[in-house]
Structures are given as C-alpha cells and as structure tokens.
Amino acid sequence: MTKQALIERTVGAIQKLPQEKAEEVLDFVLLLLKRHEERLLTEGLHHLASTVSALEFLHEEEDLYTLADLKKVYHG
C-alpha cells in the first residue's frame, strides 16, 4: 500500500469516529511525529559530533591507565 493510500484510508476511518476519538488520534499522531523529529535530531547530532574536527583530539588521546596499573581487579 502506498503512503497516499494509507493516508486516504486513515482519513476515511477518522471521519467515521466521534470528535473525541478523532482528537485522540490527532494526539497520538502528534506524539509519533515528536518522537520521529527527536530521533532525527539525535541522529543528526551524533553525525555532527563524529565529523567535527574540534573533537578529533578525543579519538587520538592515549589511555592514561592500563590493566597493568591496577592493584586489585574488581570481579562484581
């Protein structure tokens, strides 16, 4: 089913609902849209952070400590 067909079928179903239920559908759609936008924003920020040269030093930094530096190993 195409996106347009889904939209038309959904609109047809919503038109058969009482106003209160149609408002619930709108609230749910707005929630889905907000989640989608937040996910896109998060993905964009992750991509930006991975390509920004200002943070490149974090990838090149040597480890300050190794396992050999431990006096006692925690096995929890």
Image (tube, rainbow, N blue to C red):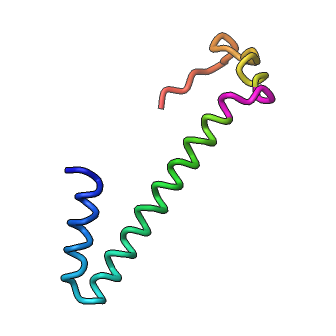
Residue 54 % position (x, y): 81, 29
Relative to residue 9, is residue 44 drawn left or right? right
Q: Magenta-highlighted stretch: main secondary structure?
A: helix
Which quadrant of the structure image shows residue 8? bottom left
**Residue at screen point 66% across, 18% down:** 70
Residue 57 % position (x, y): 79, 22
| Residue reaching furthest to the bottom | 19
**Residue at screen point 76% across, 23% down:** 56
Relative to residue 4, is residue 60 drawn left or right? right
Q: Is residue 45 above or below residue 69?
A: below
Q: Is residue 31 above or below residue 50?
A: below
| Residue reaching furthest to the top | 68
**Residue at screen point 58% across, 49% down:** 41
Determine if the magenta segment contains residue 33.
no
Residue 15 % position (x, y): 23, 81
Determine if the magenta segment contains residue 54.
yes
Q: Is residue 43 above or below residue 34?
A: above
Which quadrant of the structure image shows residue 64? top right
Residue 23 vs residue 58, the one in the foreground: 23
Magenta region, residue range = 49-55
Q: How many marks?
A: 0
Residue 2 % position (x, y): 24, 50
